[in-house]
Each structure stands twice: as structure tokens, then as C-alpha cells.
Image (cartoon, helix red, strand yellow):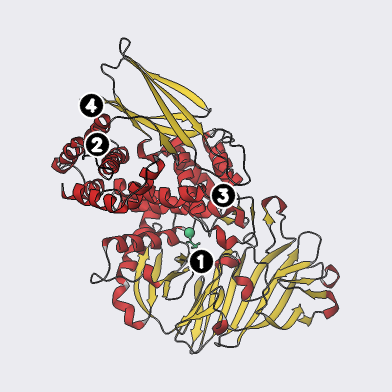
Amino acid sequence: MAETRFLGDYSPWPFRLKLTRLRFDLRPRGTLVRSELHLERRGPGPLVLDGGAGLRTRALTIDGAPVNPAHVRQGAETLTIAHAALPDRPFVLGAEVEIDPEANTALEGLYLSGGIFCTQCEAEGFRHITWYPDRPDVMAPFHVTIRSDQPVILSNGNPVASGRGWAEWHDPWSKPSYLFALVAGDLRAVSDSFTTMSGRKVALNVWVRPADLDRAGFAMESLKKSMRWDETAYGREYDLDVFNIVAVDDFNMGAMENKGLNIFNSKLVLASPDTATDADYERIEAVIAHEYFHNWTGNRITCRDWFQLCLKEGLTVFRDQQFTSDMRSAAVKRIEDVVTLRARQFREDAGPLAHPPRPDRYEEINNFYTATVYEKGAEVIGMLRRLVGDEGYRTALDLYFDRHDGQACTIEDWLKVFEDATGRDLAQFKRWYTDAGTPKLTLAEEWDEDAGRLTLRLSQSTAPTPGQPDKPPRVIPVAVGLISPNGDEVMPTRVLELTQPEQEWSFEDLGARPVVSLLRGFSAPVTVDRRIGRAERAILVAHDTDPFARWEAGHDLALESLVAMAQGGESDPALGHAWGGLLADSSLDPAFVALCLRLPPEDEIAATIATQGGVPDPDAIHRAREALAAE
Ligand code: SER
Ligand code: ZN
């Protein structure tokens, strides 16, 4: 059983790491790694370094002299050098270890993928390369020399010099070990350049195997778009002379944002019109953007510890979602993201693995690269933006980059930036980061015909999750609009801030009872409990100005019809009418209309029947869906 780690146990490393020098002699079975850590003491205690069983230690020196073995203790995962062996002045710890990339099938650290040497160090892979303070809050510039008979030899930062069989790289930006990368192989590049907003020219390369060269062009186009977008949308400029992307076939994660040297699973780089679908292109563009955006949200500002993973991932997912919205259809992107969130994150939140976006304990950090940390982490930022407004968000982000550039931060730092930039107290909002579970939002309506007044009573509750029996109320931004029966929008979007278990809002001077367009844009990651008739839903499908609410109304109407049809009922005539309206409206984005016309999948129909106490009949469900599609 692995040891549980707790957020509350954090303490800073008692040394400062001013520079890391690495020398690699790459060989498949016996790679030699020589390291120099330029250290200075900051606090009391021994020097503890992380490492794995695969490190064969050949030498250990302090300022060039061998360390007395009596002062060294090697455990299963750490190497400890006693305080007594360490000078009080700045010193250089040297180590020489041998590792076996070919035997590395865990694909963490340095390994071979189809004859290409490559690395994956997030979260704790660097400790399989050499002894090191392998924690994200220890940052240093890296100077790396690599000897290899491979024709292309890459690492982070800028190239310093190279010759036949060797290359030297320098990364001036302090970074933690999880952002280290090295690649050596027989690779070819699609090359281009990008001129940043301040006029610096950056060389760009997408490295692939020679046979894949004609499938790398789209990735390059995506990279240039991402670089421009981050300048325009966030004022973030690239900060090195080169940016390299490498595609490899064996990769645990989708892709990795190593400083200046992003490594990708080749399926997220390579595309050609013969084989790639529209969805493939969209995914490649989004992942290239995601990894590029990490250069600021993740690399320049990183995480203090792995409990803060959503600090970089939630924000970077949020940014790649914004990017895709700008490049493609914002409505379609939002709807697709909500569908995914409900399918993956809501399920996670409802099961035994429920955890908050910022967990406070873990046994294995690799198990926390979850929909909750990534996708819910992004939803939380979307809510924050809605609460402080677009301008407040922009001011807060500028302050975040100003204040924390070069630092390893926490969710507390992140929220403090928003409090300082906008004056808003975010103590209650913080529960979105610390509490697991999906709140249920309930709407009850009261209509006073004589007064023309509609009262909305909103309430919230969250079921207990493992280890968190009590769920205090959260701040829930509920975006609502009102649509009159004739289709006019009588109230444009307003954000109601639900902070109590239950609250009421009244809207006056209404001529006729309007239909409530609830949770517009999916303004909070909650489930909704409301009573709404088919006729009201049809009005929303035909007239709602909010594309998400419009899609949702049509989806629910179709689902209701399918549930009825699968149990012997008829299809709803309101549905054909509503869809006819969508098809006839030439002002709508065809991609959005196509999404609206997509019928709910069979498993969702079955799940709905089961929730209502029925017994799903797969054949009947299939026939119902075919029949409605034909209609
Ligand atoms: N840090 C990586 C990413 O999300 C891990 O997959 O981009
Ligand atoms: Zn990421």
C-alpha cells in the first residue's frame, strides 16, 4: 500500500537550487547521466533527493570530492546526505548514475519509443533519470549536454551548440524537473517561424518520423494560431528562440508541455485529409493549443505541489476551450464540453472516486489526472469569470501573471489575485475547489397573473461524498432569461447568485407568463430539477437566444419523446415543429443545427427510463430511436 500524502504536510525544501547541469551519454541499455546541482542552504536539515530503483549510482561528490559513504543513506525512493557532510557556503552536488531506457516500459523518465529516445517527467518521472529534488516548487535554469549517435538531439530552451553526435541546450527560465525533456532520434521537421508581438522571431518545428512528414502540417498551423491567440486574448508572448513539438508513438498522456519542447502522442499531431475526421482536426488543434498555453499557465507559473494540479490544468483547459470557441463555433464547443462533463465528471462525482478539484490527500498522483481536476477545474474558472465579469477576469489574470511569474503557486494565491483585483470576497466560492460532489439546483416558479409577477425560488443541495458528509451551500451563478409565449425575450440574461440553501427572486411587469430559460450557457456544473411542460420546452427550442439552453430544451424534448416511444407511446408533434423551425432558420450556424438534431444516444434513453423506475428494453429503445430519426 502506498503512503498517503497530505496537503497539510507541505513544507518548503531547505535548499535553493540555482542551476542544474546535466550530461547524458545516450545508449539504449546503459545511459550515463551526470548531474551537477548548484545548491545553497536555506534552512536546517539533511539533503534529501528523490530517485528510483532503476538508478545505478556510480559516483556522488560535493564540490568535486567524493561524499563520505558514512554520511549517505539510500532508501527505496530517496537518497539522504547528512547535514554534517554539507558545507554552509554554496556547493555543487555531483552525481553519476546509469539507467536503462530500453527496459523502461513504464514510460516515465527516459525511455525508447520506436527507436526514439524520449522522456515523460510529469508528475514524478524525473526521479527515474537521476537523484533530484523532484517536486514542482524547486525550480532552476537547466544546462544540458547530450551525446548520442541519433541525428536529431533536442532538449528544453535554446540550442547553444551542436556537432556530430552531440548537442548542448540551455533553458534560462527556471523550471521544475517535471518540465524537463530530452528527445533524440531519426526525425524530420515541418519548419516555420513566428514573429511575436514585440517583433522577436521564433523558429518553429514539428518533428515526426520521416514517413509522417506529410501529415504534420496541420499541427504547425494550429501552433501558429495558438501563439497569436495567446497574445491577443491574454497578452502572453512566447519567451524562447525556438519552439519544438515532437510526435512519438508510445506516450502515456495525450501530450506534455515541457518547456520549449512539447512531446505528443502522435495521434494528436498527425492528420491527413484521407484519414482524419473533422473531430480529429478539432482535437489536434485544441491539444496543440493546450500544451502551448501551458507555457504561461503551468510553466512560467507552476504549482507549489501536486495537490494544486488544477491550478495549471483547470486554467489551461479553460483557455483551450476559449481558443476553440474563437476558432470555431462557440455554441457547439460549449454544448460538446457540457456533454463530456456530464458523461465523465458528473459520473466521477457520483461514485466512490469523487474528489474535489483540489484534493487534500493522495496515494498516487498519477491517478489524479481526472475529469474533476481538468474539466471541472475549468468550469470553476468559468464561474469565477461570470461572477467577476469579463473585465474583472482580465484584470485578475494580468495581476496573476505580474505577481506570480516565476513562482510555484497554490489555489489560495489564485483566489487572492481575484480578490485583490476585484474586491470580491471569495471565501464561499473556494468550496468549489475543496468540496467534491455535483450540487443539485431546484427551481420552483410562482406566477401571479394579476400582478404580472413571476417568482423564482432556487434551492441547492449536494449529496455527501466519500469523506465529506456535510456539504455547506456554495455560490452558484445561475444565468437566466425569460421568453414570452410569443417568442420575445422579455428579460435578457441575468446572473442570479445563489449563496444560501434557498433564495427567491421576483420579476415584475410581465404581460404574460414567460418561460424561464434556466442555467444559460451552463453557468454552473450542477444538475437541474425543474418542472417544465412540452409546450414550454418547444418555445425555448424555437426562440431561446441562448444556444446552450436552446439545445438543452430540444434534447430534453427528444429524450422525453424517445422514453415514451420506447414504452409504447407516440412521438411528440411539438418536436417536429420545433426542429422544423431550427432547420428553416438560415441565420443559425449549420454545425449548431446539426448538433440540435442529433438524437440522445440509446444509453441515455435507457438510463432515463431506469431513473423513472421503468425497465429499459434495448430493442424497443433502438426501434424508437430509429423511428424518430426517420420521422
Ligand atoms: N500536463 C499534461 C497536460 O495536461 C498531462 O497530460 O497537458
Ligand atoms: Zn494540461
Residue 221 shown left or right of residue 253 in the figure? left
Q: Name the residue tied to disc 2.
A: 541
What's the distance in space between the residues labelled 3 and 4, CA to CA? 42 Å
| Residue 514 coordinates in the image, percent (x, y) | 29, 23
Q: Decide which of tag 3 and tag 4 comes sooner along the chain.
A: 3
Please give the label number shown on residue 355.
3
Q: Decide which of tag 1 and tag 2 comes sooner along the chain.
A: 1
What's the distance in space between the residues labelled 1 and 2, CA to CA? 46 Å
Q: Name the residue tied to disc 4.
A: 488
Residue type, label 2: Val
Residue type, label 3: His
Residue type, label 1: Lys
| Residue 296 coordinates in the image, percent (x, y) | 49, 56
Q: Decide which of tag 4 and tag 2 comes sooner along the chain.
A: 4
Q: Decide which of tag 1 and tag 4 comes sooner along the chain.
A: 1
Q: Decide which of tag 3 and tag 1 comes sooner along the chain.
A: 1
Which mark is in front, 3 or 1?
Answer: 3
| Residue 435 coordinates in the image, percent (x, y) | 57, 43
Q: Which quadrant is the N terminus positioned in?
A: bottom right
What's the distance in space between the residues labelled 4 and 2, CA to CA? 13 Å
- Count up the numbered dots: 4
What's the distance in space between the residues labelled 3 and 1, CA to CA? 29 Å
Q: Are marks 1 and 2 in contact (CB under 8 Å)?
A: no
Q: Name the residue tied to disc 1.
A: 259
Residue type, label 4: Asp
